Image (cartoon, rainbow, N blue to C red):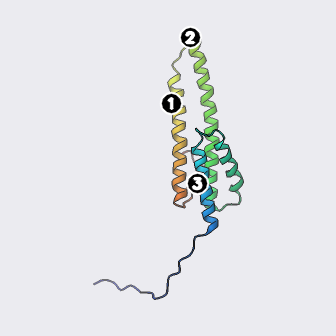
């Protein structure tokens, strides 16, 4: 015998989606796409960074976590990328001068790992934004 469940005869109201929430979600997804377009359009991440800084303050918790996540990803990628580039140029100059110390593969691995990390963070952010979920911990190095 199944337990009795209360039945409700009241009509269910279907609410229209909040247009401001849709606009914010669209803008979040657009900034993620701009970050993903960085190999093809060199200024795209800078446009996305400006959008993030402008919209971070007045947005709700959901958008704030995403913008914070994007801004942090940009700056960490930028700083580690600069350090990797300097190390790469150093190993290249050592190689050219004949003092090859075998540092080319670790430096290349750092830069390649940074690229994978960057795109993985952007894809995680897109999935979370599409599901209308905040980033759990936007201050972490991982996801």
10 horizontally vs 140: left or right:
left
Tell me: residue 66, above or below residue 82. below
Residue located 54% across and 37% down the image = 115
Find the residue positioned furthest to the left: 1
Q: Label for residue 100?
A: none
**Is tag 3's residue or tag 1's residue first in the polypeptide sequence?**
3
52 horizontally vs 132: left or right:
right
**Distance from the alpha carbon under mark 2 to that under mark 1:** 22 Å
Nearest the viewer among 91 and 45 is 45
Residue located 51% across and 27% down the image = 106
Q: Position of residue 60 (x, y in %)?
A: 65, 62
Residue located 50% across and 30% down the image = 109
**Is tag 2's residue or tag 1's residue first in the polypeptide sequence?**
2
Q: Position of residue 54 (x, y in %)?
A: 72, 53
Look at the numbered disc 1 and give the secondary structure of its residue.
helix
Tell me: residue 114, above or below residue 123. above
Foreground disc of the pair 3, 1: 3
**Distance from the alpha carbon under mark 3 to that under mark 1:** 29 Å
Tell me: residue 141, above or below residue 10. above
The answer to whether residue 93 shows anywhere in this view is yes
Look at the numbered disc 3 and give the secondary structure of its residue.
helix
Quarter-of-image position of residue 37:
top right
Find the residue positioned furthest to the bottom: 9
Q: Residues within 10 Å of mark 1 (few under 14, many from 20)?
A: few
Q: Label for residue 98?
A: 2
Residue located 63% across and 53% down the image = 67
Q: Position of residue 65 (x, y in %)?
A: 61, 55
Q: Label for residue 29?
A: 3
Q: Residues within 10 Å of mark 2 (few under 14, many from 20)?
A: few
User: Pointer 1: what residue?
Assistant: 109
């Amino acid at each position: 015998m199944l337990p009795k469940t209360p039945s409700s005869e009241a009509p269910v109201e279907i609410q229209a989606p909040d247009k401001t929430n849709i606009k914010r979600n669209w803008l979040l997804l657009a900034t993620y796409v701009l970050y993903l377009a960085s190999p093809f359009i060199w200024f795209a991440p800078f446009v996305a960074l400006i959008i993030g800084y402008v919209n971070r303050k007045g947005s709700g918790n959901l958008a704030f976590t995403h913008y914070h996540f994007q801004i942090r990803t940009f700056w960490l990628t930028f700083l580690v990328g600069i350090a990797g580039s300097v190390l790469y140029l150093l190993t290249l100059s050592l190689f050219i001068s004949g003092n090859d110390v075998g540092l080319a593969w670790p430096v290349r691995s750092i830069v390649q790992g940074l690229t994978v990390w960057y795109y993985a963070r952007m894809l995680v952010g897109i999935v979370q934004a599409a599901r209308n979920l905040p980033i759990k911990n936007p201050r972490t190095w991982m996801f």
